Image (cartoon, coloured by chain):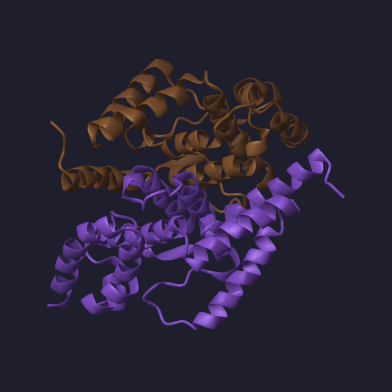
Chain colours: A brown, B purple
């Protein structure tokens, strides 16, 4: 049974208006100015703009349009599951289950074919195996340290993050999909993190 | 003279961190919940997600990747020029001049080749002549009425907008690049606008 066109569009609009709630999910990172915490919707725009601008840093053969699509979708699950700060303590398995349930519900609002296509992109991002997913995940990890540097410590200060923790939880993922960006950020991040620790 | 790679990346990062300021530019439209005004960064994400989801509404031969790129960039000039509410009174020529000056400055932060490419995309969006620009512009006009419907009037209430004003300032642009979306929204918008006028 195929949906008639207005029904299809109405389902798409239900999804798009539900997505609006991502503007009310706060993250652990602050704006560059430090004025407030950023939300996951504006973060999603910012990281997609990073992908567009830094496309030449992507691995050979990486389709940047697919990277941007993944980044536009990647945080929608937080509408139900919330944001899990990278330096926070949380139950990984419980979080993963909550995010999968959220993906079922939210992508399930779409017409079935499109819901399956978006879900596949989100699954691919989470699995972090393809060049597109690895570059997208690297950018997602690369943005917040730049905000922390700009606002003099941000979430590093809040969570008392040392260099080793940053290198293992954040650096490894950045290096994996975008080694050139890791080379660029590592000394800049280290200078701030080590100054905060003194 | 070509830039060395780290200089190129440093210029790109200057642009991307300047872009962060778009998160602090408020618009005339509120979140679907009505809780607060939305900002231009989260709006840019939302409208890019509309493009990804509603791609099948685009004119024949429209490259949706270019539409999304345009939408990620389209409001950056507001960092300097501010948002001009569609129902507000403003000096069109002065606003256009301010936005062009903003585009010169902001895209000018990028390496010259990339700054020119992004500027060309923004100019194309503004000129509203290609299928990609027309679809992008239609979506940019299509999102806010959906928010207004969700929060029972929003900017229509604030600006005392009647049906004729809505149809000429917003409807004409939606219909131009996405007639199927105009057919969908027109009766829904009209019901709310006419109820508010009673």
Give coordinates of residue B123: x percent, y percent.
57, 64
Give coordinates of residue A9: x percent, y percent.
23, 46
Q: Quadrant of the image for the C terminus of chain B?
A: bottom left
Report whether B112 appears left or right of B38: right
Give coordinates of residue B153: x percent, y percent.
24, 66
Q: Residue at x 44, y 46 (%)?
A: B64
Report whether B162 appears left or right of B97: left
Q: Residue at x 61, y 41 (%)?
A: A154
Considering every residue shown, the one lying at the far front of the view is: B61
Give coordinates of residue A85: x percent, y percent.
50, 31
The one of A161 and B40 positioned closer to us in this rendering: B40
Res A157 visible: no
Res B44 visible: yes
Against A174, residue B92 (above or below) is below
Q: Residue at x 52, y 34 (%)?
A: A67
User: Which picture quadrant has residue B85?
Assistant: bottom left
The one of A144 and B177 positioned closer to us in this rendering: B177
User: Which picture quadrant has residue B162?
Assistant: bottom left
Against B154, residue B131 (above or below) is above
Considering every residue shown, the one lying at the far top of the view is: A93
The one of A141 and B172 positioned closer to us in this rendering: B172
Report whether A180 appears left or right of A177: right
Against A178, residue B120 (above or below) is below
The number of numbered discs placed on residues in the rendered structure image is 0
Against B147, residue A101 (above or below) is above
């Amino acid at each position: 049974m195929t949906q008639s066109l207005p029904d299809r569009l109405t389902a798409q609009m239900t999804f798009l208006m539900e997505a609006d709630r991502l503007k009310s999910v706060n993250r652990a990172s602050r704006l560059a100015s430090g004025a407030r915490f950023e939300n996951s919707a504006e973060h999603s725009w910012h990281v997609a703009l990073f992908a567009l601008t830094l496309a030449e840093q992507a691995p050979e053969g990486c389709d940047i349009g697919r990277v941007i699509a993944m980044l536009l979708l990647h945080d929608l699950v937080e509408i139900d599951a919330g944001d899990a700060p990278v330096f926070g303590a949380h139950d990984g398995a419980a979080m993963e289950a909550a995010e999968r349930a959220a993906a079922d519900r939210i992508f399930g609002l779409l017409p079935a074919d499109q819901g399956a296509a978006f879900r596949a992109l989100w699954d691919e991002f989470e699995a972090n195996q393809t060049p597109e997913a690895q570059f997208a995940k690297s950018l997602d990890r690369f943005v917040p340290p730049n905000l922390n540097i700009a606002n003099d410590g941000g979430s590093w200060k809040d969570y008392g993050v040392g260099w080793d923790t940053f290198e293992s939880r954040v650096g490894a993922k950045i290096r994996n999909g975008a080694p050139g960006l890791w080379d660029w950020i590592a000394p800049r991040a280290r200078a701030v993190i080590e100054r905060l620790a003194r």
